Image (tube, grey):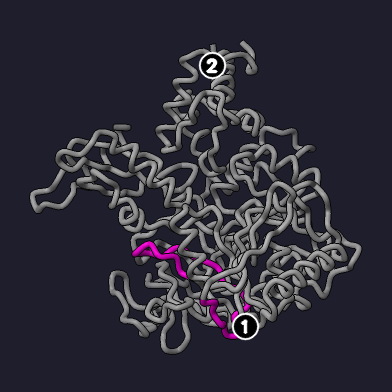
Amino acid sequence: MSGGDVAPADARALVRAALDAIGAALPADDDAPLGIDSFSIVLLVEELEAQLGRRIPAREVRRERFASIAAVAALVASLKDALA
Amino acid sequence: MLSWLVGKAQEDDLALLRPSGEGLRYRDLAMAVAATSAAYTEAAGSLVGRTIALAIADPAGLLIGLLAALEAGATPVVIDVRAGRGLFEQQLARARATLVVRHDTTDDRLTLEPGHDDPRLIEPEVALVLFTSGSSGGAPKAVALGGRGLQHVIDAILGYLPVDATARTPIVLPMSYSYALVGQALATLRAGGAVLPLHDLGFAGEQLAAMTAHGATGLSSVPTSLKILARAALELPPETRPRLRYVASAGAPLDEATVALVRQAFPGARLFNQYGLTEASPRVTAISDDEAAFARGSVGRALPGLTVVSVGGYGAPLAPGDGGMILPPGEIGQLRVSGPSVMLGYLDDAEATRRVIDKNGNLLTGDLGYVDGDGYVFVTGRADDTVKVAGERVSPAEVAETLSPTPGLGELIVLATADELTGMRLVAFVAPAPGAAPGLRTRVQERARELLPPAKRPTRVVELETLPHLPNGKIDRVALRRMVELGG
């Protein structure tokens, strides 16, 4: 699937788990703004990289990619697809 | 101070980039500063000997607000808007400002509000007040910096860093940091160069694109940020990376891996390692990579006009007012700084001031280290329990104290653990009080988000039924650290 498609549930769960692991507040729903500060973005990327077992390219770490759980999950799904 | 800062600049030269991408020339900057200063005076009358609290997230707005405060004869107090609500309110209260300046993001303008009910009078030699975190007790300390000291440091920085009227200096750290505000932004204005505020640590790709687009000439940051930017740069073709004259590090130890990454990413840049602290305005030492001691991990020699020595001995706390005994070259002690840029003191905290400034006006840094026979300074650790998380000084004990009142909390310990990217990070272990409602971990996380700035929040909160204890009753830190290492 492409990064812009609806991410599968496991990718969303992985993002929620990563947010929880770094102590960030979980948004009301998957499409709501993440609302996390830039330091937390760094931690979230690090946490996702640990869970995925690969680097997330800096070109993918953009505001719109980290706008919501759904957006991050789409990124995660595309990276998983790239690994497959 | 204001005319000293911008007096050298050419009025048609670019001074500052606004968030909109609009560039302000020095002429425009002067007009914006004059208009803002006039608005301050109109709102509050004479501000000479008064403080103005700047609670402004936009770095360009903060710079204009600060220069306008100096123009009005007031002392600017920079509030860290990223601090949690508790610290933010404490900083605002400590400022006891006549005016509070905020930034209205909807139309990118500064708004003025009446300040404290009992605004302070401040000595005219205090040119700037910045906050730094306390090593214990959690109360932020308001560092009063003198105009003469700031001028001394800024000119000393311009003596080694290749920043001149052609400089385009990106600011990738919060402007409330002395490192960003004094060491980069004000130094660039003094040189007649342009300040490019780009703060958004999380989006390195965007920062790099902006640096390239605006012709950034150098980069100063903390090692965590340098590492993130260097990694991101290496994904780009070399011709699209910013062409930097220099890359400078401060705020935390500069490790070899980061040096290697930076060299690979920005091959034409000279590297600098630096040491300083807000209480010293902030820069104390610097070294470039063409000096042999750079590779040995030195932070350099003292800047002209400053002296650094190591005093006392490891584990031998000094009494308030005691500057300690100077140790021979190579012997580790507490680093002590002397010179015109040592702060005037902590506002309203004579006791804390006495703990760090001895009877001869020397500053005890709280950092451990040594000075070798050639005058090169090496930093080896801290004399207290603080650690550096992404370049920010953090006390696990202070964090634990802030989190302790969480409802239903039985026991809590906050440990600092090593992290490849941020240097250190905090992990909190919690156990509920008997009969506590479920959800302790969530309540602790919520309290951390509410009251602590990002770098001070535990990145993991682990809830256990009970915390492990040693036979003497103390919490078993070793067992908990092992749990972290095993990913438990």
Quarter in which the C terminus of chain B is drawn: top left
The residue furthest right is B12
**In what element is the residue under mark 2?**
helix
Magenta segment: B118-141
Instruction: State yes or no: discs 1 and 2 in contact (Cβ < 8 Å).
Output: no
**Mark 1 sits on what residue?**
B49
- Judged by its main secondary structure, the magenta piece is loop
Q: Residue at x 78, y 46 (%)?
A: B20
Asked where in the image residue B339 lies, by quadrant, the reply is: bottom right
Q: How many marks?
A: 2
Across and down, in percent, residue B141 comes to 46, 69
The local crowd at label 2, few if under 14, some if 14 to 19, many if 20 or more residues have their Cα within 10 Å, is: some
| Residue located beneath label 2 in the image | A80
Residue B301 seen anywhere in this rendered image of the structure: no
Residue occupying the point 54% across, 52% down: B82
Q: Quadrant of the N terminus of chain B?
A: bottom right
Q: Nearer the viewer, residue B246 or B294?
A: B246
Q: Which mark is residue B329?
A: none
